[in-house]
Image: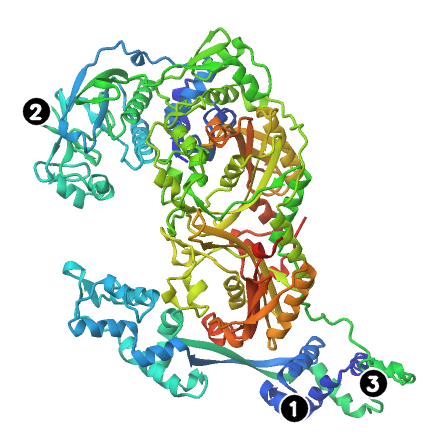
Amino acid sequence: MPTIQIKMKDLENLLGRSVTISELADRLPLVKGEIKGYDKTSGELKLELNDTNRPDLWCVEGVARQIKTHRLKTAVPYPFYNGKRKAAAVIEAAPSLKMIRPYIGACIARGLTIDNETLVQLIQTQEKLSESFGRKRLLVSIGLYRLAKIVFPVTYKTVRPDEVRFVPLGFESPMTLRTILEKHPKGMAYAGILSKAAEYPLLVDRENKILSFPPIINSREVGEVQVGDRDLFVEVTGTDLRMVILTVNILAANLADRGAEITPVEVRYPYLTDFGRKVVMPLVLSKPMTVPLHDFRSALGEPVKMTGAVSVLKAYGYDAKARGRNLTVSVPAYRDDLLHPVDVVEDFAISRGYESFVPEMPSEFTVGGLSSIEQFSDRVRESVIGMGFQEVISNILTNPDESVARMNLPASSGYGDLVTVENVMSQTYSALRNGIIPSLLRVEAVSSKSFYPHRIFEAGETAITDAKSPEGTRTVLKLAALIAHPAANFSELHSGLDLLMYYLGRAYQLEPVVHPSFLDGRVGKIVVEGRNVGLTGELHPQVLENWQIAMPCAVFELSLDDLVL
Amino acid sequence: MSQEITQLLSGLHPLERKVLSTLKVRPILWDHELMQETGLDESRLSMALGWLMTKGVVKVADEKATTFVSITELGKKYREHGMPEKRILNDIQLGKKLTIKDLRERSDMDPSEVSTAIGNLRSKDHEIVRVGQGGLLELTGIPLPDSIEHALPLLLAMLASSSGPMNQLELLDESKHLLNDILEKKWKTRGVVRQHEKKSKRLALTDLGYELVKRLTSEVVSEEAVSQLTPELLKDGAWLGKSFRKYNIGLKPSRMATGRKHPYREFLDSVKTKLVSMGFEEMRGPLVESEFWNSDALFMPQFHPARDIHDVYFVDHPKSVRSLPEPHTSQVAKTHETGWKTGSRGWRYAFDIERAKRLVLRSQGTSVSARTLAASPRIPGKYFSIARCFRYDLVDATHAPDFFQVEGIALGETITFRTLLGLLKLFATEMAHATEVKYLPAYFPYTEPSVEMHVRHPSASGGLGWMELGGAGLFRPEVTHPLGVKVPVIAWGLGLDRMAMVALGIQDIRDLFSSDLDLIRTKRSRG
């Protein structure tokens, strides 16, 4: 979730009025925002914006715009969205980009006053949009330039890695594109995006002056915006044209909010795009959506009048018109998040205020209950507790060392039926437990200071691979119990197992088995109606040694899924 | 004073008398000497000393710790075959062409051994081996540290030839140094040797003790007081006329090992009971989920950032499910691409069925709700699950490697945004005993409208602060229709771990899953 740092003063300038911190807190539900920090003296404010589908709200301009819209009860107008303004400049895209980074969009902003705070906010927005929305610049990246340095038309083309050199931001001397990817911090950070490309994107003007190496770094000469600059060229490249256009639209609105005059830029593609061969941006993306008035009533649980729907939606920035029993609505060009009429219904509810809806209890009668396995597990737990065992709850993520090596099981078996993790973060958590005994031994290993005897158990989930099932794995509910004290042995625990099986009404046999985790001759399979449901025995001293446990331990483990009727 | 002594005397246990009469002769003794003199075994002696110390008769005059060192199985293996570092180095010196991958595939060493050895050989400040052309390992010329080359083999040899654990003081200086500086940090964690401490205590009489033992002689113990009433004494009336030794009932009793629910389980069980009483039926799902159920069925596009390798654990073995259920899969796929018949425009991308088959560790309990929707649920119906979930987060005080999520659904013809708010209000009062509730707009990929519920709770942040209790919303038609459900569905989730931590007085979420038996045994559960 994006978090932004802004200044209260800047927010107030954009709102056009002063606002207290508690007034602001009351308005923030409009943008699904939360105050995460406020420094009264510096006026610095930290906001978290929770709507990952509304990148237009991840900046102070967007937050102010939504709040202002609600106050004015109508959208803030942006004349450059209506498509009537002529493009002031042209970008020519080269055919070779099609397989590398096919799309570009741009606009020109004139007459800004770039002060320190504006610059900070521009950079923050650029960062949020390219990192979060643009997936670390893969889908979208942004470049800002000093307009005066550029002679149009600009060409978006590709060059070989060593073909050109320029001075990138943050450096003093010229570098080739290859060197930038190898040496420049931004180059190293984003080189992955171009790892499959034989040629790299480049933006140059009519005089072959290099603007930037998208999506990596700007040229220092043209692309270092400074306090005091007034006219900017804003460019967005990417792999998804819809996202590129939306980004241009958002940036254009933000700059306009700060007093800039926006003029569109035309991009000429040598290939066909979803928006044609000539695309002039900013550009309205969304088509109007039809929402039956009835949808509001059925989703919200109370009648909504047509006039009410229109005015409440307008106060959230919509263009809304009544068409019989339907509404035709559209959102401003800085939004592209309407998938379904329910999205409009939510915006209606937010605009009206969630507090304006009276909670109502669901009235339909339903019967509650537990699953049969949970009931069975509860019964088993109660029996085992009655026998004097302390319950433990362990994490399910574990590792092959605990599940296999320490249990004296051969590692050559490829960890048997263990479900292992691919993107391991820590070796400690690299597999799911396939049994509960290691979880109990983990308790023993750290609890030698707790007074003996130890009688502990856990009833919990485990996972195993299962090549036969269509799902590939199975979750099995198991129970394991352990005793540890100087005289702990097979027969003491056998008494417990015997009593448990008696109470559960399951006839069982113990059949001798050889198992490397246990002392030979002191371990048995637990067999119920010919099915193997678990095992019990005295743990092998080598296993105890592996866990650094200095107390004899006997355990049993049962699969509750196999025992439940 | 004298009255106190008389009282003490009459309450002395035979074991205490034994200890005191020994101390009367030799007032300061080490515990092992005392054991010898009294002839008591360790546990009886410590019992008697415990009593005497609570009575203030005996005190600990001195204490010393002795460290013993012994060799482990792994240590013996290293002694026989050599340290992994040394063996790898030998192989390179012999001219073998080895890459790191070759080393990892060695059958005679564990993968973890190999990783540690490589780590030590390539450590930044002491690079003994580097990766050269073609990934081949080559020597830098820096020799192995002396500790691995000489000191450790020497120590292992000594320990192996000793019949039992060795007193650390008796080791060679070189070995002692190794133990102090290196063993603690490196070798012990590798399990090569084991150290344990034994504490000896020197016991002495207190002033009160001196007074007591003086009287111990003069007081004639004429008749042995009975300490335990037995069936025999009762059978033939032999108890008549006997005197029974008086107990010191002010002593702290020994602790009792009992059977008990885990305090966190007690909390979860109460949640379970509460939900059942509100008419919710339990639903269950697997720990390992296909991405289909974990995300696709919830209308989270396959490019959604919460689905990447930095947020979800992907399963290495096995990689994928073999098949996915129909017609749900095709319907979900079409909904993602174009909206299908849901009235949505869809996410506009090419749905990848192989991606949907990929297995992950369940990252949200909502996947259980999705499965329930697809399995012809009751209408009207209410369901819940307490599901273990996994998130790709660094484990710390606020992140456990896996944790419980309490989630559920309510479905029916009459479900609306207002009944959603009503249900949340019920949760707030019933589950959190909240005094006030606030509903805020929220964002979840699978619900619209979405709500976050904040409650004012007596125990939240120092009294009457607001805390987030949970999130909820109406499932998007893009979720319900492809799974065959046509009525509105409330999806809700409660963040109960924070409530559990408040209830159990725990600050670190990892303590909910602690392995420390003492902590589990002593944790009181508060209602």
Relative horizontal placement of residue B173, taking residue B514 as reference (left or right) = left
Observer-nearest of A533 and A299: A533
Relative horizontal placement of residue B387, taking residue B205 as reference (left or right) = left
Label 3 marks a residue whose chain is B
Residue at image mark 2? A207
Identify the mark at residue B39; answer none if there is no mark. 1
Tell me whether circle 3 and circle 1 mark residues in contact (CB < 8 Å).
Answer: no
- Whether callout 1 and callout 2 share a subunit is answered no
Q: Amino acid at mark 3?
A: Ala
Compared with B155, A401 (above or below) is: above
Tell me whether circle 2 and circle 3 mark residues in contact (CB < 8 Å).
Answer: no
Query: What is the secondary structure assignment of the residue under circle 2?
Result: loop
Q: Position of residue A150 (x, y in %)?
A: 14, 23
Query: What is the secondary structure assignment of the residue under circle 1?
Result: loop
Q: Position of residue A517 (x, y in %)?
A: 48, 71
Residues at marks 3 and 1, CA–CA distance in whole angstroms: 22 Å
Identify the mark at residue B225; answer none if there is no mark. 3
Q: Amino acid at mark 2?
A: Glu
Work out which residue is located at the far top of the displayed protein and give it: A324
Residues at marks 1 and 2, CA–CA distance in whole angstroms: 104 Å
